[in-house]
Image: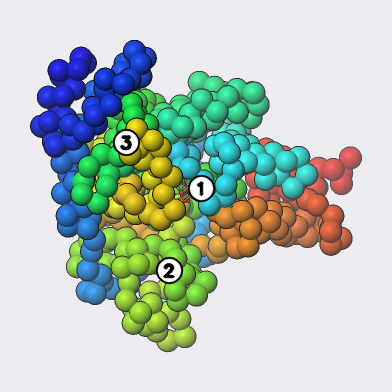
Amino acid sequence: MNYAEAEKLLKSCGQEHVLAYWKKLAKDERRDLLAQVAALDPKSLKRCAAALKTGGDTFDSSKGTAPKVAELAGAERAKAVAAGEKELRAGRVAALLVAGGQGSRLGYDGPKGCYSIGPITGAPLFYFHARKILARTIRYGAPIPFYVMTSEANDAATQRCFEENDFFGLNPKDVFFFTQGMWPGMTKEGKIILDAPGHVFMSPDGHGGLLAALKRSGALDDMKARGIKSVFFFQVDNPLVEIADPAFIGYHVLQKSEYSLKLCAKRDPFEKVGMPMQFGSSYRMVEYSEMTKEQCLRKAGKNLYFRYGSPAIHVFDRAFLAREAAKAMPLHLAFKKIPFVEDGALIKPTEPNGYKFEKFIFDILPNAKRAAFLAFEPKDEFSPVKNAEGSDSPATCQADLQAKWAKWLAAIGVKVPKGIPIEIDPVYALDATDLQKVGLALGSE
Ligand code: UTP
């Protein structure tokens, strides 16, 4: 792209100020700016500017009802596990990790997946995810391809972390990195923000950027070529997640669902989690900010009526993802402090001054022809690392990891004294039953 082409593109969407400092830019700054402009899509820019006028895509949840949530037990659970194990043995299951976030609340300088969480080894979050996938691959004798979404900002460091750790034992041929998209930040008036005279401020387009990125990178084609049917989706910050849990995969397949969600009971009526609601024959994720106080407090017997929140643990039908990847997703606005250039000087605002645009993966829920909801016990499967301190921090996550392992050890008669750290490699034991087998084997030596 040359200057004239860039000017034409920017003029077509009212953003010609992006070239305001052109005359003062060095040769390589000009080249980089032209590359940034070439990557801008005028149609998307107009959509962003229009979203600012309407306040983004918001939703009236007042007519929502609570969906039916399964609590699998006994024979029903066994049936789901058998169906899931069949899928895993046939190699029809993939794991999909979104790891493109900025982790700003944790304040860690690097990809969140590289953050050290192992209570003894200090192993990173990626280690626990990859080793669980490896353990299931060994258990079921078929690969589980691992698709890892990164962002421009953390892609190189993420790939380096895998390489330096020999892919944590996984076959590199079964690990597929792909990068999510970036969107420019805008002022309240819908003007693109420059964070240097020759540079547009860009931020990741949210975990919903996943769909376009899966398509663009060829990951969807790769899944199809490998015969993948079910895609287990999870977030980087939760090392307790039961990746490709056979009961969940099996329930999803038996229900002929296109989009299945694991849900857990809210810890309090106003907990900040998304909540799936039913609207006639379809479902939609309603954000906590879109619920009224009455909805949050509504009771059904002893429990809350809207009892279950979503910790973003999903199973998707691959063909559903392919269908949705061709469509535009709703835009969500986040009002943030964005550094900007004024009269050639960089200013770091102390108050929010501009908008970032994000897409959320759960916005495709209403498009699913069939959806399924499965309750689970959060103590065993959910303890995210979000904040540096306090709730949902490394300290609470490590405590929850160790409580889970201590429970497994107690099941084989090992009582760990308080204060002694515990850590179990998922390849050594993926669950309590595995540990039981290892324990019995050791006992018989
Ligand atoms: P969060 O909403 O917790 O955001 O992401 P974050 O960026 O990790 O942390 P904060 O809000 O800046 O503190 C939930 C999951 O979605 C991924 C994250 O990597 C995490 O696994 N994510 C989020 C993306 O992959 N891309 C994004 O643009 C945003």
Q: Nearer the viewer, residue 55 or 34?
A: 34
The local crowd at label 3, few if under 14, some if 14 to 19, many if 20 or more residues have their Cα within 10 Å, is few
Q: What sort of colour scheme is used for the picture?
A: rainbow
- The amino acid type, in three-letter code, at marker 3 is Asp
- Quarter occupied by residue 194: top left
- Quarter occupied by residue 269: bottom left
- The amino acid type, in three-letter code, at marker 2 is Tyr
Residue ID for mark 2 = 308
Which labelled disc corresponds to residue 381? none
Q: Is residue 429 visible?
A: no
The earlier-in-sequence mark between 2 and 1 is 1
The earlier-in-sequence mark between 2 and 3 is 2
Compute the Cα span from label 3 to label 1: 29 Å
Residue ID for mark 3 = 343
The local crowd at label 2, few if under 14, some if 14 to 19, many if 20 or more residues have their Cα within 10 Å, is many
> Relative to 239, is 423 on the left or the right?
right
Q: Position of residue 222 (x, y in %)?
A: 37, 25
Mark 3: is the Cβ under 8 angstroms from ligand 1?
A: no
- The amino acid type, in three-letter code, at marker 1 is Ser
Compute the Cα span from label 2 to label 3: 51 Å
Residue ID for mark 1 = 104
